[in-house]
Structures are given as structure tokens and as C-alpha cells.
Image (tube, rainbow, N blue to C red):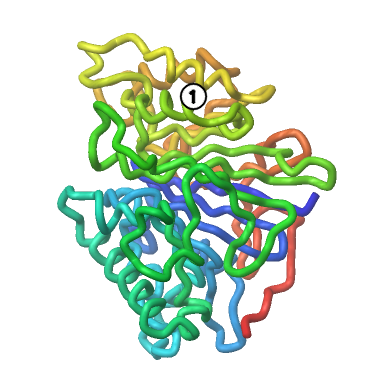
Amino acid sequence: MANQSIKVYPVGNGDTSLISLSGNQNMMIDCKIDNDAPTNKDKFDVKADLVANLPKDSEGRHHLDVFILTHPDNDHCAGFKDTFFCDDPANYDKDAKDRNAIIIDELWFSNTLFDRFTDPLSEAAKNFKKEAKRRKELFKNSPEKAKLPGNRIILIDFKDECKDDGFESIIVEPGTSTNMFNQVEKTDFSLFIHGPFKTPTADSQPRNETSVIMQLRFGSANDEMAALAFFAGDADYNRFQRLLDERDDESIQWDLFLAPHHCSWTYFNMTPYEDFPEPQDSAIEFLQRQRGAGMIVASSKEIIDDEDNPPHYPAKQEYIGQIDEDDFYSTGDDPLTPLIFEAGNNGFSKKDYVAKANLVSAISGVTEKAKTYG
């Protein structure tokens, strides 16, 4: 099995995960990247780590194969414009080179960003939406140019409801899986996209209703689902009830679960916690879909016994009631060290982070040649 891994960066209450795939491909799910990290000894420098590990093209520009935004809350897209190059790569200039702006070859997002998400957007979310709109307009007006790395898009939407004529070829529908990433067909990795759902979910907050929910499937030679990870943005307990009701068992199994909304109580029930202190059956039932010894990761600040939510101490207690306590990880436990989980033939194994310049992966012993772009 090729070395494939999930790196969860320590960014406080926020999500920033780098998925390293075979063939030297890399995928990022969400970002919360602080500009002051290079000069703040209390913060991990996510961008520096990306620059040290992502491959470069013949012009020395760093590339990320795929970026997926689960939803446009600020703690899922902060630092987007300062980290990535938000324009046609043909316009990549000295300023972009000096700041090591990373080119996203293929941008994935839910079309609900344009037609269902009605809450006010942060500046970071506006920057993301501007780049998404640029790529959509390019695909409509100059489809050949839109096929080039740095201009590509994939819409997570329903074809019969998409308001963009002619976009069917770049749509991945919720309720289906895909193994095509940055125009490469993978044999050892795929995504099953669960949400957003076609219709609104009762009692869900509108901003979290639009979250992309997905099962990441890492394959081996004999098993295309050797290691399964589950990401759901800020989806709440109602969305997981729908998964249990509407999806087949295979697509909602997991070996590693990224705790939604940074380990908040909303995965388990409504808030405030004092009024709804018992977890919903759906939350517990989904956790029991783990295969073997499941791992749960909280991308949050340190979880302590106080009234914060997120992260929420009673939520953590519910999680560790369903798994071995040693298999619960929080990025807040060591805010200067990413958590790395390597996919294997039977789930994931925790690996130590090793900071090394100019390597594709920070897992000890894994080196690959940088791919080329044409």
C-alpha cells in the first residue's frame, strides 16, 4: 500500500487537514491559517509546512492538487487569500513568488455557497467565493482554459438542480463516490460525498446545513476501503440522523472521525447543554459505526473542564465513552505539532510529525520525487 496519510494541523478552533495521496498528490480540506504564525512562537506555521512539502512546477511554483471547502465559516477558510494564489496562474507574478503563493490546481466547493448559504460572509469567505466565481465564469466563457491547473473546479451539487447550464461534467453529486482528483483517476483513493442534502434538514442551523459531508476511502491492493475517514465540517446531530436513515451502511462506516464543529455539543444535541444534556440516539449510533478500534480527532484548542463550547468537555466525555480513551486526539494538546495518521491495510496508525524541508511528506522515511506539470 502506497504511503497515504491525513495531517491535521493545530489551528485552535478551526479545521485545516492535508491529505497526502499516492503519486505525490495532495488534498486540503478547509483552512484556518494565521498570518502571524511565522513570528508567533505559540502558533504552528501551517503555510511554511505546506511550502516545505508540496511539489513545485518547473517555474518553482508550489501546487496543491485539490482544495475542498466544507462550508464558508471563517474558521474553515481563514487565510485563504494569503496562502493561495487567487487568480489565473498565467498572472503569477513576482509578488506571488515572493510570498510563496500556492496554486490550487482544482477547487472543490458546494454550490450552496451561491444559492443556499444566506448568512453574512467573513472577508475570508468573500475571498474564497470570489475565486470560486472566477473559476465558474472561466469554465462558462473559456472552457479550454478552465481545464488548466489553477483554473479547474468541481461543484458538489445535484445535476437536476444546478442553475449553471453546461456544468454537468464538473459536478459530483451527493450520494455518489468519485475517484477522479485533479484529472487523475485514482485506484487507491476515493471520496463518497454525503452532503449537503438535497432538501433542508429540520432544526439544523442554516450555516451548518450547507456543510460538505464525506467519507474518505483509502485503498490497498486487496481492499478499496482499507482505511476510512469521515469529515463533516460543522454538521450537527440532525444531519447524522439523515445519514443513518438515507445512506447504506458501508458509506457511513469509519476508522477515523474528525469531530464536527471542533468537538462541540451540537454533534450530540441542541444547545445550550444545560437544557439538552442527553445525547441523541443518532449521535451514539453513528459513533458505533466505527470499524475495530476507531480514532476520533478534535481540531480545537485544548479541551478543559469549563463552559466553553466549542470545544466542549462533556462532548469529549461522550466521545471517549465510545472508543478507547487513548484513541481520542486533540490538536489543542500540543498546539505546535500536527497530528498525522497513516492509512494502512486495517485502518489508521498514529505517526510522529517530523519537520523536514523539501520533503513531500513529514512522515519519517517517506520520500517521493516532485511531479511535473504540463
Question: Outermost residue toward the left?
Answer: 120
Q: Name the quadrant of the C terminus.
A: bottom right
What's the residue at 44%, 39% (across, down)?
Answer: 232
Asked which quadrant contains residue 196, the reply is: top left
**Callout 1 secondary element:** helix
> In the drawing, does residue 331 fall left or right of residue 22?
left
Residue 317 percent location from the top left of the image: 43, 16
What's under tag 1, amino acid-wise?
Leu
Whether residue 301 is visible: no
Q: Is residue 195 above or below residue 293?
A: below
Residue 142 percent location from the top left of the image: 41, 85
Q: Closer to the camera, 247 or 161?
A: 161
What's the residue at 47%, 20% (across, down)?
Answer: 319
Residue 17 percent location from the top left of the image: 49, 50
Q: Residues within 10 Å of mark 1 (few under 14, many from 20)?
A: some
Pointer 1: what residue? 244
Q: Closer to the camera, 332 or 205?
A: 205
Q: Give the number of marks.
A: 1
Asked which quadrant contains residue 259, the reply is: top left
Q: Is residue 124 above or below residue 255?
A: below
> In the drawing, does residue 154 fall left or right of residue 370?
left
Residue 65 percent location from the top left of the image: 55, 67
Question: Outermost residue toward the right?
Answer: 222
Whether residue 227 is visible: yes
What's the residue at 37%, 42% (across, down)?
Answer: 198
> In the drawing, does residue 357 fall left or right of residue 43?
right
